[in-house]
Amino acid sequence: MRRRDFITRVLAASAVPIVAGCASSATSIQKVRYIPVLAWHQVVGGVARTRAQDVLWDYDKDCEPTAAVCDAPMNDETVSLAQLNAQLSWLKAQGYASITADHYHGWVSGASVPLPAKPVLLTIDDGTLNSYVGVTALLAKYGFNMVTFIVTQFADGATANLEPYVGWNASWDQLLALPSAQWSFAFHAGARGHNITFPNNAACQYYYPCQLPTETVSDYRSRVAEEITTGRQTAARMLGTRMNDKVWAVPWGDLGIQANLPAEGDAKTWLAPWAATQFPVIFIQDPQHNGYLHERYRLVVQGTWSQALFEKYVEGNIGNGFFNV
């Protein structure tokens, strides 16, 4: 079963119309039984910084060189600004207040951290420019903040003015220019980890959860460990104290342990336990592994959802206990 089919199955299971009771205390972590974690990717409809209309992304070409921001409207995970506005408005109306990755980590680990009565962790992946244009104003409008999971390869490429990153990904300076009231950072992938790096390896095309036929166990482990370690160090050096090093959003949501997601060789038994020694919180897309080896479930929002479906899936995930500590 491929990733899209798996997401469809999870969402169908999540649609139980049960809503768990909200926490009654604004400070006691013991009374907060669950914290919904939501993830977005591309956002279409922002106003470009140097022209009035965004340029549509073409998968075979780069966006026009004069464009300030490119969009990816054909991606299932792409939402419009109007969709995001409706989703954030609903969360606000339900009484949710956003928290930081620091607070989420503290809650998971049992530390004494102040939490609102109905906390929610809002996240967005990859560091694309369209994740910020227009989105920052919406976050400010509702008093929310968001964690953006960074790929160092993308920020490096945009900083060096390289194709296809420039105009598509945010540079390090652009990331740092985001207002701290709305944005903080965490690790997603390093210099290669977000790529489908091995197209000739039919069994598995993902960088982290695949030991290649040509690799020894030692080679595979060294490759993955070095990529993650170096990427974390780079992100921490470039983003400073706004970078949370305790949480990791796994690219493709795949640690190699889910039976229906691709893995090969030593990845099936080594990657998840090793990652648990590195990160206290590891975000994946499989609710069945929530709480296993530091793994925490995220609901990835799809642009194909109506507002009614968004609300149904959030409430269904809560009712099924997918976000419970």
Image (tube, rainbow, N blue to C red):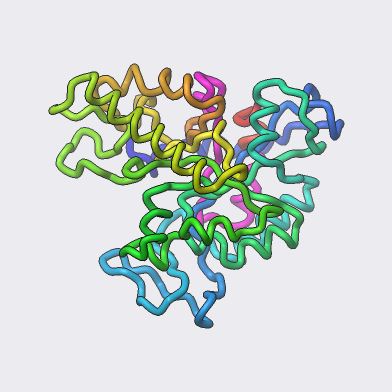
| On screen, residue 77 above or below 104 | below
Q: Residue at x 40, y 79 (%)?
A: 66
Specify whether residue 78 is in view: no
State which region is magenta. 287-315
Left or right of 137: which side holds 253?
left
Q: Residue at x 30, y 37 (%)?
A: 207
Residue 50 position in % (x across, y down) = 51, 80
Verify whether residue 309 appears in magenta: yes
Q: Which quadrant of the figure contains the C terminus?
A: top right
Location of residue 251 by image quarter: top left
Residue 13 position in % (x across, y down) = 53, 34
Residue 17 position in % (x across, y down) = 67, 38
Q: Residue at x 53, y 51 (%)?
A: 40
Q: Residue at x 47, y 19 (%)?
A: 277
Location of residue 231 by image quarter: top left
| On screen, residue 98 above or below 138 | above
In the foreground, 51 or 56: 51
Location of residue 161 by image quarter: bottom left
| On screen, residue 60 above or below 142 | below
Left or right of 196: which side holds 114?
right
**Total numbered circles:** 0
